[in-house]
Image (cartoon, helix red, strand yellow):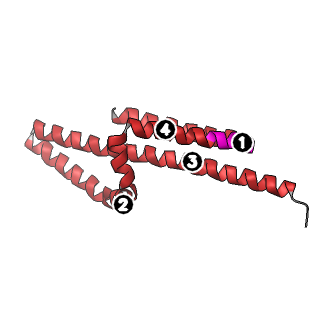
């Protein structure tokens, strides 16, 4: 999948998360629980589809995220420096390998972002469920 298509998929998933959260705010506790179950099942299905990449990313996600964030500026500058040297050297094959490596890095980062959105979706729905349950309990309890 191209980086552009991955970004489009990420944007759609973020939009779906917002829509799901907006709808869940107006649903019953049972409907929210069903939505959570469906979201978890969808996540499992997506994770199975990209298990090789997502499995590794999920295991090391937290450490990789911190490392990626810390190294992003240095890698960007290094890539720019290498690209400048490549223009001077006119080495098309080497430039192609570097472009492919940069695209693979971007694809890995996008896979991680999709995994984070999956986790955020469940967390948001769990929070809405907890609020709905608390509100129902408050409404059912006699005033003190």
Q: Is residue 46 above or below residue 135?
A: above
Q: Quadrant of residue 60?
A: bottom left
Secondary structure beneath label 1: helix
Q: Is residue 59 magenta?
A: no
Contact between marks 2 and 3 (CB within 8 A): the answer is no
Q: Which residue is mark 1?
A: 30
The span from disc 2 to disc 3 (Cα, nearest Å) is 21 Å
Q: Which residues are magenta?
A: 25-35
Mark earlier in primary sequence (4, 3): 4
Of the residues under marks 3 and 1, which one precedes in the sequence?
A: 1
Could you tell me which quadrant the C terminus lies in?
bottom right
Crowding near pointer 3: few (<14 within 10 Å), some, many (20+)?
Answer: many
Give how far apart the Cα atoms at labels 4 and 3 are.
17 Å
The secondary structure making up most of the magenta span is: helix
Cα gap from disc 4 to disc 2, whole angstroms: 24 Å
Q: Counting residues from the N terminus, which is met first, the one under dot 4 or under dot 2? A: 4
Residue 62 in percent (x, y) is at 40, 58
Which residue is nearer to you in this view: 91 or 132?
Answer: 132
Between tags 1 and 4, which lies in front?
Answer: 1
Residue 48 visible in the current orientation:
yes
Pointer 3 residue: 122
Label 4 or label 2, whichever lies nearer to me, is 2
Image quarter in which the N terminus is found: top left
Residue receiving disc 2 = 63
Q: Is residue 138 left or right of residue 16?
A: right
Side of 13 relative to 138 (left or right): left
- C-beta proximity under 8 Å, tags 1 and 4: no
Q: Where in the figure is residue 135, as x and y percent of width and height?
A: 79, 54
Is label 3 or label 1 in front? Answer: 1
Q: Secondary structure at mark 4?
A: helix
Q: Nearer the viewer, residue 10 or 140?
A: 140
């Amino acid at each position: 999948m191209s980086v552009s298509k991955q970004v489009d998929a990420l944007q759609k998933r973020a939009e779906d998360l917002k829509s799901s959260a907006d709808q869940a705010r107006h649903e019953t506790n049972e409907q929210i629980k069903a939505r959570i179950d469906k979201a978890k099942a969808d996540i499992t299905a997506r994770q199975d589809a990209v298990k090789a990449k997502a499995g590794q990313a999920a295991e090391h996600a937290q450490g990789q995220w911190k490392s990626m964030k810390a190294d992003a500026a240095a890698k960007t500058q290094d890539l720019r420096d290498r690209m400048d040297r490549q223009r001077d050297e006119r080495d098309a094959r080497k430039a192609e390998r570097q472009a492919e490596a940069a695209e693979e890095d971007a694809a890995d980062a996008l896979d991680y972002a999709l995994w984070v959105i999956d986790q955020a979706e469940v967390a948001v729905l769990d929070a809405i469920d907890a609020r709905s349950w608390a509100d129902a309990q408050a409404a059912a309890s006699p005033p003190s």
